[in-house]
Amino acid sequence: SAVLATMSANIASNVMLELRRTNVKAPTATQEELDEIESRVRAQYGEQSDPYFATSRLWDDGIIEPAQTRDVLGLCLSIVSSTPDAMGHSPVYRM
């Protein structure tokens, strides 16, 4: 049920339609062209906002399935706790 997108398909299609309408160089768009743009944008968002689409292209660090959350968190905490602190580390003081 998760979706990865910066905006909804409705908003994205409205933005694309508005850009097409206000494009000075392009001739006036017909309603059929606008409907085609809207359907293409909605289809693209439907496909590309799926988390598996994004992770298959390595756009993120992967998906942790809910049943694996504890195992992954335990592994991360184990790695962090066993890693020695960097030598020569000095804190940053702020006033």
Image (spheres, grey):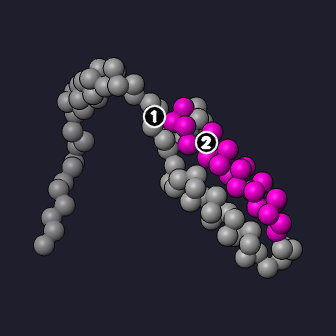
Query: Residue 93's quadrant in the figure?
Result: bottom left
Outermost residue on the left side: it is 95
Crowd band around label 1 with a 10 angstrom C-alpha radius: few (<14), some (14–19), many (20+)? few
Q: Amino acid at mark 2?
A: Gly
**Please, what secondary structure does the residue beneath circle 1 have?**
loop
Crowd band around label 2 with a 10 angstrom C-alpha radius: few (<14), some (14–19), many (20+)? some
Residue located at (19% from left, 61% from top): 92
Residue located at (21% from left, 49% from top): 89
Of pointers 1 and 2, the one earlier in the residue sequence = 1
Which residue in the structure is indicated by mark 2? Answer: 46
Residue 8 in sight:
yes
Image: magenta residue range:
29-52
Q: Is residue 58 left or right of residue 80?
A: right
Q: Is residue 47 left or right of residue 94?
A: right
Q: Amino acid at mark 1?
A: Ser
Residue located at (29% from left, 20% from top): 71
Q: Position of residue 46 (x, y in %)?
A: 61, 42
Majority secondary structure in the magenta region = helix
